[in-house]
Image: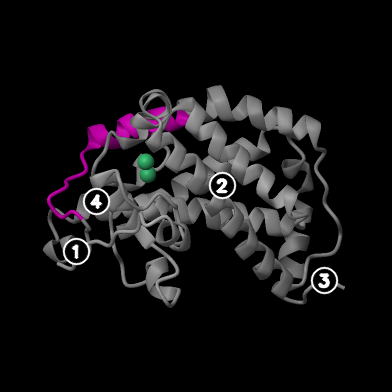
Amino acid sequence: MGSPLLQPMWDFVLSKEYCIRSPFYPVFFSFTVYVVFCLPYLILDFLSPVIPVLKTYQIQPRTNVTLTMVAHCLVHTIYSHLVFIFPVTVAAWYWRPVYLPAVAPQLHLLVRDVISCLLLFDFQYFIWHLLHHKVPWLYKTFHKMHHKYTATFALATQYSSAWEMLSLGVFAGLTPVMLGCHPMTEMAFFIVNIYLSVEDHSGYDLPWSSHKLIPFGLFGGPGHHDLHHEKFVFNYAPYFTHWDKLFNTLAKQPTK
Ligand SMILES: [Zn+2]
Ligand SMILES: [Zn+2]
């Protein structure tokens, strides 16, 4: 028997089975979730120059996000989704048929598996990221593009080279497969992962930011990744802090 809380949600998802089974679904899902999570931060970016209190939450308050920056990043994201992500997701769809069991997972198993996926993804990205900073050729060829903006803003999240987009896409796609997750857990992980990556680049340290909700400094939050964009040599892990602590590459934003 599925979780009484998750089963109605899963039944709703199953009622849209014809969409989920489409080869267009993965790229549509990934792009839509990304834009929806970016939107509130973009609204903040355009309101903060006229509502001074909002600037107090901005990590680098001297940054003003312009329409040109937004358009530049958005066009790049649309291009990447059409030219690189779409063919790869269609190949993955062909290689691994969509599996939709009738029963939803138990809530505690979904939570446990989403956390496991985040930990595994964080580890893979940390290694990839460290390597792409320590090897100058890798940095210049593949990762430098993502460092165009030294102050983060939401749409800079996916402003990166094709190789970086595909590597992260493969890590995110394979992680729930390696851990044998339920398809609902896989969807939940994708949504949480996209949210956290956008929050990392949002440029705002809000009262509900992830590092304030997760205790003991286990999580870096947006300040952690913004400092990586500003200083380049710290904070290589995207979410958790343990790998940077272990490798002595952890740094904190100076308190304002
Ligand atoms: Zn970097
Ligand atoms: Zn970044």
Q: Which residue corresponds to the image point at 55% horizontal and 32% vertical from the top-left? A: 166
- Give the distance between the C-alpha atoms of the residues marked 3 and 1, in whole angstroms: 47 Å
Report the magenta stretch's main SS: helix
Nearer to the camera, 170 or 104? 170
Nearer to the camera, 76 or 8? 76
Q: Nearer the viewer, mark 3 or mark 2?
A: 2
Q: Which residues are magenta?
A: 60-78
- Give the distance between the C-alpha atoms of the residues marked 4 and 1, in whole angstroms: 22 Å
Report the side of 128 relative to 233 (left or right).
right
- Residue 9 percent coordinates (x, y): 71, 65
Q: Is mark 2 within 8 Å of ligand 1?
A: no
| Looking at the image, residue 100 lies above or below residue 149 | below
Q: Is residue 72 magenta?
A: yes
Q: Earlier in the sequence, mark 2 or mark 1?
A: 2
Query: Can you identify the residue that label 3 sits on?
Result: 2
Tell me the quadrant of the picture where the C terminus can be found.
bottom left
Query: Can you identify the residue that label 4 sits on?
Result: 45
- Give the distance between the C-alpha atoms of the residues marked 4 and 2, in whole angstroms: 31 Å
Report the side of 204 relative to 255 (left or right).
right
Q: Which residue corresponds to the image point at 55% horizontal and 35% vertical from the top-left? A: 167
- Residue 152 percent coordinates (x, y): 29, 47
Q: Which mark is residue 254?
A: 1
Amino acid residing under circle 1: Pro
Tell me the quadrant of the picture where the N terminus can be found.
bottom right
Q: Quadrant of residue 105?
A: bottom right
**Disc 3 and disc 1 in contact, CB within 8 angstroms:** no
Amino acid residing under circle 4: Asp
- Give the distance between the C-alpha atoms of the residues marked 3 and 2, in whole angstroms: 31 Å
Q: Earlier in the sequence, mark 4 or mark 2?
A: 4
Q: Is residue 180 magenta?
A: no
Q: Which mark is residue 124?
A: 2
Q: Earlier in the sequence, mark 3 or mark 2?
A: 3
